[in-house]
Image: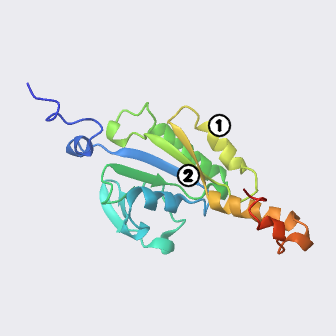
Amino acid sequence: MTSDAETPSENDLSFWNDRHLKFRVLILGRANAGKTTILERLTGAAMHEAEVWRDGKYWLAVKGQIDRGLHNIYDEIRFRSRPGFVFHDSRGVEAGSATELSTVQRFVEERSSAATDLRRQLHAIWMCLPLDDSRELFETERDIFLQLKGMAPLVVIFTKHDGAVSKETSQILMDFPENTRNRVSDDQWDGNAYG
């Protein structure tokens, strides 16, 4: 009988690596939604360090900005720094074509929890929604929520929060009366005004 110290935990990366298991994530969002930033932060690696695998074979190294927006959802994006993860990226959802939405839906259906090949199963969908833009959801983004519901866990990641805060702060300053913007009265400095 082995002790708990010798038995690999399912939370231990070696447990997954020894069995060649991968946590498979589809990352969605419009162009400039912060998908690349999320991947770089999670993996601790720059995008140019990523490898693209197609049909189980190494296909190419990502060249950074040159390859932006040129994604095949079936390609696997892998990082040596996070060998237990495989990412899939579709074109920006603002592309909005029925074909693109259909491609995403077909991919998710094929790799949902109903998939028979566990090594290809999709474990999560990360939907990146930037907060730095006051636009409402694109129709395609709303369709994704409706059509992919229940096929795989859907995680919404609100990105670019700093841009939203910056816009809000700018608006407050713009709404502030002009004659008080750059003026501080003596009683604001006496310690009572802010104490």
Where residue 17 appears, as percent x and y from the top left, is 24, 46
Above or below residue 59? Residue 179 is: below
- Categorize mark 2 by other alpha carbons within 10 Å: few (<14), some (14-19), many (20+): many
The structure residue drawn at horizontal position 74% and vertical position 58%, both measured from the top left corner, is: 194
On screen, residue 171 versus residue 109, left or right, reads right
Which residue is labeled 2 in the image? 28
Answer with the quarter of the image where residue 3 lies.
top left
Q: Which mark is residue 172?
A: none
The residue depicted at 85 percent of the width and 67 percent of the height is 174
Secondary structure at numbered mark 1 = helix
Q: Quadrant of residue 177?
A: bottom right
What is the distance, in whole Å, between disc 2 and disc 1 at their CAs? 14 Å
Residue bearing mark 1: 146
Circle 1: residue type: Leu
Q: Residues within 10 Å of mark 1 (few under 14, many from 20)?
A: few
Instruction: Give the residue at the far left of this rendering.
Output: 1
Residue 81, compared with residue 113, is above or below; it is below
- Residue 154: percent from left, percent from top: 54, 39
Seen as rendered, the residue at the extreme top is 1
Which residue is nearer to you in this view: 128 or 151?
128
Up-down: is 2 above or below 97?
A: above
The quadrant of the picture occupied by the N terminus is top left
Q: Amino acid at mark 2?
A: Leu
- Residue 107 visible in the picture: no
Q: Residue at x 33, y 55 (%)?
A: 82
Viewer-proximal residue among 191 and 96: 191
Q: Is residue 43 above or below residue 137?
A: below
- Tell me, yes or no, if residue 7 can be seen here: yes
**What residue lies at 34% left-to-right and 54% top-to-bottom?**
55
Left or right: residue 95 compared with residue 119: right
Which of pointers 2 and 1 lies earlier in the amino acid sequence?
2
